[in-house]
Image (cartoon, helix red, strand yellow):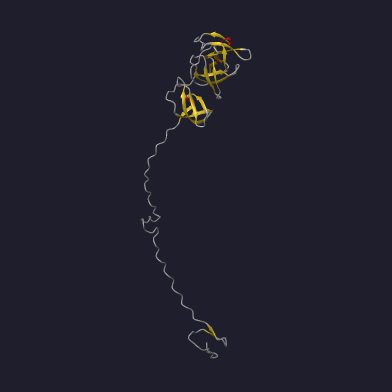
């Protein structure tokens, strides 16, 4: 029964197409986990499913390849671009990541080719643990690491450094640049000392040469003392007299 294409009875009383992906027994009654084409899931009893095709039968529509660039029906004939990332073991459902980041398991009938971009090419060198720059949105690149790859290495699940996660094709990944090796030291040629400047003094010597002392100016001759007599107010220009020549008073 697993992998069989069925019509499943939803809670609103309407039958919808889907695929059985798991089976179990509950209280002696078989139950089947149905993945509906619109993305919903439910455990249903045998009375709530109608088998449309046997397990392993080719599903309606053309099964896309992993990494294919597609248009996918998000809901009720609302088609959006994305990439096929994974397939279930029976090849009846395909995990599509839309360009806006939404994801959904869809049947082949809900997926069709899209030629707006090339399909993702296998890139086996992008192994888990590879440091990359991933294009989260158009021209918005952020650092992260490859967490895992799909079965044919066409899509890569990126764990970004800020905690976000997203499937990306190789064309939206850049390898993180390797650590740069130290650059060798460049030998600098000593620059010639300009002619107009004195050469630097050797270590331990004064930075500037001592200037010779400037010659001292000759001392000006002392002017003769000028006296006046305290009694007659006579001006006396000679300094070798002890009495006023006018009144005879002692100077």
Res 159 visible: yes
Return the x and y of residue 161 as percentages of the image width and height: 50, 31
Picture quarter containing residue 11? top right
Nearest to the observer: residue 184 or residue 247: 184
Residue drawn 47% across and 26% down? 147
Nearest to the observer: residue 45 or residue 232: 45
Residue drawn 55% across and 18% down? 72
Return the x and y of residue 216 as percentages of the image width and height: 43, 70
Name the residue at the front extreme.
Answer: 27
Picture quarter containing residue 185? top left
Q: In this view, does 165 lie above or below 239?
A: above
Q: Is residue 206 left or right of residue 158?
A: left
Name the residue at the right extreme.
Answer: 12
Could you tell me how many numbered marks the image carries? 0
Nearest to the observer: residue 12 or residue 129: 12
Return the x and y of residue 188 as percentages of the image width and height: 37, 45
Res 115 visible: no
Return the x and y of residue 52 as percentages of the image width and height: 55, 8
């Amino acid at each position: 029964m697993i992998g069989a294409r069925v019509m499943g009875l939803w809670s609103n009383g309407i039958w919808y197409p889907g695929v059985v992906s798991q089976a179990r027994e509950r209280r002696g009654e078989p139950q089947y986990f149905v993945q509906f084409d619109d993305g919903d899931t439910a455990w249903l009893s045998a009375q709530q499913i109608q088998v449309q095709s046997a397990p392993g039968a080719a599903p309606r529509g053309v099964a896309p390849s992993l990494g294919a660039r597609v248009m996918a029906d998000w809901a009720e004939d609302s088609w959006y671009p994305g990439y096929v990332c994974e397939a279930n073991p029976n090849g009846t459902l395909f995990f599509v990541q839309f360009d806006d980041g939404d994801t959904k398991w869809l049947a082949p009938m809900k997926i069709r080719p899209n030629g707006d971009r090339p399909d993702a090419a296998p890139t086996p060198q992008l192994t888990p643990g590879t440091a990359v720059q991933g294009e989260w949105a158009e021209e918005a690149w952020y650092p992260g690491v490859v967490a895992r790859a799909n079965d044919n290495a066409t899509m890569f699940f990126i764990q970004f450094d800020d905690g976000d996660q997203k499937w990306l094709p190789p064309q939206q990944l850049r390898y993180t640049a390797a650590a740069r090796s130290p650059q060798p030291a460049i030998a600098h040629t000593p620059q010639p000392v300009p002619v107009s400047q004195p050469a630097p003094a050797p270590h331990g010597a004064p930075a500037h040469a001592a200037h010779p002392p400037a010659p001292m100016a000759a001392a000006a001759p002392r002017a003769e003392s000028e006296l006046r007599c305290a009694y007659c107010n006579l001006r006396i220009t000679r300094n070798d007299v002890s009495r006023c020549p006018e009144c005879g008073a002692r100077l």
